Image (cartoon, rainbow, N blue to C red):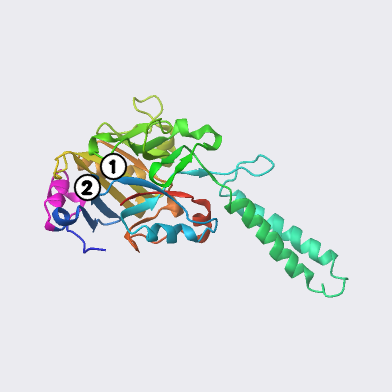
Amino acid sequence: MQREVPGDPAGDGASFVRSVVGHPLFRSSGVAHGRGTDFRWAIVDPERYPLYVWRRSSPAGWSYRRTARALDAAIFTNGPMMGRRLPDGAKLTRSRVPVEFALWTAAGVAAGLGLAHLPGLRHGWLLGGAAGAAAAWKRTFTGWVPCGGIRGQADGIDDRRDFDNEGAGHAWLGRFGREFASYRIGAGDLPAGVEEGAGGLILLVHDFTVVASRAGDPGYRRDFAELAAKKGVVAWGLVPSGGTATGAGVLIVLGGRRLDAATAAAVLISIGTRDAVATDQSGSVMMGSGRTCLLRGPSLPRQSIQLYGLCCR
């Protein structure tokens, strides 16, 4: 990964993008990286490094971060929000996970104790507990579904699953061609005709305005209202007239584990971002360049939940 370029979007305002795209490193490579107080940033010329969707290379959860690094992309991040329902129909939530592990581990231990009288199974409760925990892992950290459509023509990705039909209440990022003018961010699920893009994202900025978090206000978005203060954010934004070779615009990515969506939206507005979205939040955030993670990677359970990501390569 190339060395960092000076600049802080939180403090430089409207001059930030102009300064970065004028830097020799950006002019020569089409990408620049740097850092603010609580986040990392990247600016990319999308006509040199177009947006793509990527997919985890194997069912194994630990392959998620490895797949991202193997892309050797100008920038890579995690992707859409994900959802999961248990066989009994209950929606899997963060609070339900420890309950599942406790119940299934206890059931395994009980089964093992019941077989302890058999030869060779004196310590069957240990095997039973391990089997129960393995079953809980499978129930809670596999089989998650994106909360919106995913399409990537380059890699043959066309996932139309939409967990609980949530896509309509979220947002999407995609491109219809390779030039900056073909990039769009919109409310709702991924529309037809997108070459590369993802739904299930959180709308932060629309038409140079931070979306509203108070019901009844114009531009109100419920997902932003519910998630604006949640720590751990990676945001993608479209900044027109960014000073690239064509003068069309650039993509900006902000990511930080202490950053929240409301702060990210405010920073993006200050530098002239037209539209912006955030990926899945909190422990799921991931951001990197080349083979290097710029943020601490997701834990193994979070990697197991995630299936898709975004990148420019």
Q: Nearer the viewer, mark 2 or mark 1?
A: 2
The residue carrying pointer 1 sits among few (fewer than 14), some (14 to 19) or many (20 or more) residues within 10 Å by Cα, namely: many
Q: Amino acid at mark 1?
A: Gly
Q: Which residue is mark 2?
A: 45
Along the line of sight, the residue nearer the viewer: 235 or 69: 69
Q: Residue at x 73, y 60 (%)?
A: 106
Residue 246: image x %, image y %?
A: 14, 41
Looking at the rendered image, the quarter that the N terminus falls into is bottom left
Figure check: 311 above or below 123: above
Q: Is residue 80 above or below residue 24?
A: above
Viewer can see residue 180: yes
Q: Give the image location of residue 229, x and y in percent.
A: 39, 44
The dot on residue 237 is: 1
Q: Is residue 119 above or below residue 278?
A: below
Asked whether residue 273 is in view, the answer is no
The residue depicted at 76 percent of the width and 63 percent of the height is 109
Judging depth in this view, the residue of 262 and 113 nearest the camera is 113
Q: Which residues are magenta?
A: 7-24
